[in-house]
Amino acid sequence: MSEAMLSKVRKLLAQAEDPACTPAESAAFTAKATDLIARYGVDRALLAARDPATDPVGDRVLDIVAPYARDKVGLLAAVAEPLRCRCVRRRQGNGFALHLFGFASDLERVDLLFTSLLVQAAHGLAATPVPADDHPAAFRRSWLAGFAEVIGGRLRAAETAAAETAAVSGSGTPSVALVLADRSDRVQRRLAEQYPRLRTAPPRRLAGTGFSSGAEAGSRADLGGPNLNGSSAVARRLGR
């Protein structure tokens, strides 16, 4: 992501986090930051349709460590899938290695958002008391599940809106929908080449009561932040 775009996103998020900001103003600043990140993804996709060398398909591996490694993986998937990336989970020690596939610009967006959201989730968990009648680990797992689910929905809505805006403006030839669908297909083919026999993990059963509290935090989360390196190091900060 360009420094100019990052600067705009950082300024918007700084305004959204200002204690003097009203909830309505904070929501407006956050929505604008999300819109910028989504439009950046569509713009890069359309540019790559004309010049594929500007945005190649690639992959990277992120180390996700305990505690709550599986829940962090769920958050990464909630960020990656709306941004047209795919991930494969591999057990590694007491955590996971996440093999992430996508176009370079989309991998960049995933890293940007995932790093920021891990920090926000850590802060949210630290500020949320565990009910006396709930097990702390079970509560926090369900909290993270609610947080991830809402984040995924917000990102899907932002990506859809950005694509529709680009289509209406006529900025894409061929159509925006075809370009984005082709990118998703190419990412899936790249993944299948390396993992031809993938199995789908069974759904989780969570017993904690923190889902609604995590979902509320996800609705307030800032979908952006500084492009920090070392996502696995940040992931280690999530445990409380």
Image: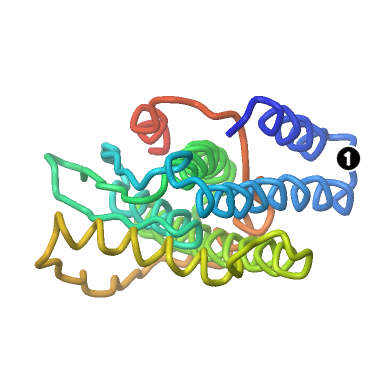
The amino acid beneath tag 1 is Cys
* Circle 1 residue: 21
Task: Say which residue appears at 59% left-offset and 60% top-offset.
Answer: 155
Crowding at dot 1, Cα within 10 Å, few <14 / some 14-19 / many 20+, comes out as: few
Residue 225, above or below 110: above
Viewer can see residue 210: no
Which quadrant does the C terminus fall into? top left
Residue 58 appears left or right of 209: left
- Residue 202 percent across, percent down from the top left: 22, 74
Q: Nearer the viewer, residue 84 or 227?
A: 84
Task: Say which residue appears at 56% left-offset and 59% top-offset.
Answer: 151
- Secondary structure under tag 1 reads loop
Residue 209, above or below 139: below
Task: Say which residue appears at 61% left-offset and 62% top-offset.
Answer: 159
- Residue 226 percent across, percent down from the top left: 59, 29
Task: Say which residue appears at 66% left-offset and 31% top-offset.
Answer: 6
Which quadrant does the N terminus fall into? top right
Q: Quadrant of residue 193?
A: bottom left
Residue 14 appears left or right of 121: right
Q: Nearer the viewer, residue 185 or 53?
A: 53
- Residue 225 percent across, percent down from the top left: 62, 35
Q: Tell me how many marks there are.
A: 1
Q: Nearer the viewer, residue 143 or 28?
A: 28
Q: Quadrant of residue 33?
A: top right
- Residue 161 percent across, percent down from the top left: 70, 66
Q: Quadrant of residue 231?
A: top left
Viewer can see residue 209: yes
